[in-house]
Amino acid sequence: MTMIKAGILIVEDEAIIAMELESRLQGLGYEVTSVVNTVDKAIEKAEADKPDLILMDIPWSNPLKCLLLTNTLMGHLTGKKNEA
């Protein structure tokens, strides 16, 4: 039986943490589609890569920004406009 690898987009602004996440996920057999560190890049890569899962750092200094990004990404991935 062949297992399908889930594609994962990592959104993390700290390079060392992003590299560690990528390494661990790949070690577990997941495909990391992209690693990005900005909102604009996250939206661009989510549209291009169509990942199965997005792991996103939540900046506790500005959680509203993270929620707005999540809302935007959900709209792009589902093709529906989400109201914040």
Image (cartoon, grey):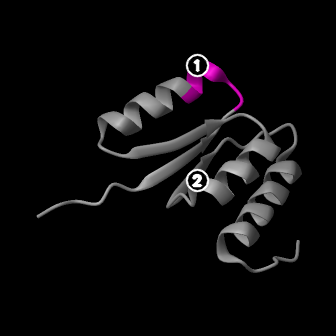
Q: Residue at position x 71%, y 77% from top?
A: 79
The residue at the far front in this view is 48
Q: Which of 69 and 34 is in front in this view?
A: 34
Say which label, 2 or 1, has the lower sequence index: 1
Residue 15 colored in magenta in the image: yes
Above or below, comparing residue 4 to residue 44 in the picture: below
Q: Which amino acid does label 1 sit on?
A: Ile
Q: Is residue 41 left or right of residue 30?
A: right
Q: Is residue 34 left or right of residue 45?
A: left
Residue 16 colored in magenta in the image: yes
Q: Where is residue 14 in the image (x, y as percent from the top left)?
A: 68, 24
Q: Residue at position x 47%, y 42% from top?
A: 32
The residue at the far bottom in this view is 80
Q: Is residue 73 left or right of residue 7?
A: right
Q: How dense is the environment of label 1, judged by Cα within 10 Å: few (below 14), some, or many (20 and up)?
A: few
Q: Which amino acid does label 2 sit on?
A: Ile
The answer to the question of whether label 2 and label 1 lie on touching residues, with beta carbons closer than 8 A, is: no
Residue 54's tag is 2
Residue 16's tag is 1
Q: Residue at position x 63%, y 21% from top?
A: 15
Q: Where is residue 12 in the image (x, y as percent from the top left)?
A: 66, 35
In the picture, which quadrant includes the N terminus?
Answer: bottom left
Q: Residue at position x 49%, y 32% from top?
A: 21
Q: Is residue 52 left or right of residue 59?
A: left
Q: What stretch is highlighted in magenta?
A: 13-18
Find numbered disc 1 in the image and state the secondary structure of the residue it sits on: helix
Q: Nearer the viewer, residue 70 or 76?
A: 76
Residue 47's tag is none
Q: Position of residue 10 (x, y in %)?
A: 58, 42
Above or below, comparing residue 49 to residue 38 in the picture: below
Tell me which secondary structure the magenta stretch mostly adopts.
helix
